[in-house]
Amino acid sequence: MISTKDFRTGLKIEIDGKPFEIIEFQHFKPGKGGAMVRTKLRQMMTGQVLDKTFRSGEKVHKPDMTVTEMQYIFKDGDNFVFMDLETYEQMHVPGANVGEKGGFIKEGDTVKVLLYNGELIGVDLPANVSLTVSQTDPGIQGDRVSNATKPATMETGLKVNVPLFINEGDVIKVDTRSGEYLGRE
């Protein structure tokens, strides 16, 4: 059990059998009565954000979560297939559980995944990844100074706006938090 005095940003808690992550919290004491803790929580399965107030000293459950390294093998329709590096078991994960982060993962990449009761609910990515441009309009020579960009499709299917001088086959760095072009490899 986790007490409200142990709350901090990023802490994972369980309410009504669902995992939540604390986005922000604030201890306050109203004029009358005991102290309270106001929190903003993100439901980890759906991404829904809600506000909840707890009485000071109230206890909540700690979710059954584990972080493990898995290797992304391939995409099977809408599912992502990951392999546990210790047991070599394969896990078929719905695309909704991986979310937008699936566009940053290449076949063969090893990533840290968050498992809740044995079900994958999140993928932890590095700050940036290197991806190969698979499709874009031809580069324009001499147009390196302007801020003009063009759309490009990466090997994973991710779409990124890149400078005009980037060509197909170029390897670029992409920020996994914002999806923006960072530079060439």
Image: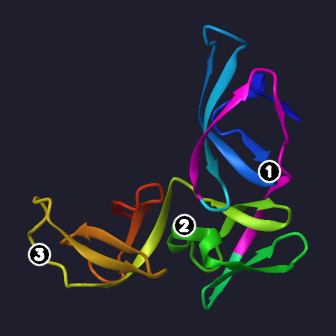
Q: Residue at x 42, y 77 (%)?
A: 132
- 31 and 128: which one is in front? 31
Q: CA distance from mark 1 to mark 2?
A: 27 Å
Q: Position of residue 178 (x, y in %)?
A: 41, 56
Q: Earlier in the sequence, mark 1 or mark 3?
A: 1
Callout 3 amino acid: Gln
Q: CA distance from mark 1 to mark 3?
A: 59 Å
Q: Residue at x 54, y 66 (%)?
A: 101
Quadrant assignment, res 150:
bottom left
Tag on residue 141?
A: 3
Answer yes or no: do the residues labelled 2 and 3 have beta carbons within 8 Å?
A: no
Q: Earlier in the sequence, mark 1 or mark 2?
A: 1
Q: Position of residue 162 (x, y in %)?
A: 27, 68
Check disc 2: other Cα within 10 Å, few if <14, some if 14-19, many if 20+: some
Q: Main secondary structure of the magenta part?
A: strand
From the image, tell me which residue sits under label 1: 16
Up-down relation of residue 6 to residue 9 (above or below): above
Callout 2 amino acid: Lys
Tag on residue 101?
A: 2
> In the rendered view, does 129 fall on the left or right side of 141?
right
Dot 1: element? loop
Stretch in magenta? 47-71
Check disc 3: other Cα within 10 Å, few if <14, some if 14-19, many if 20+: few
Q: Residue at x 62, y 33 (%)?
A: 39
Q: Position of residue 61 (x, y in %)?
A: 85, 42
> In the rendered view, does 36 fall on the left or right side of 104?
right
* 2 vs 3, front mark: 2
Up-down relation of residue 105 to residue 113 (above or below): below
Callout 1 amino acid: Asp
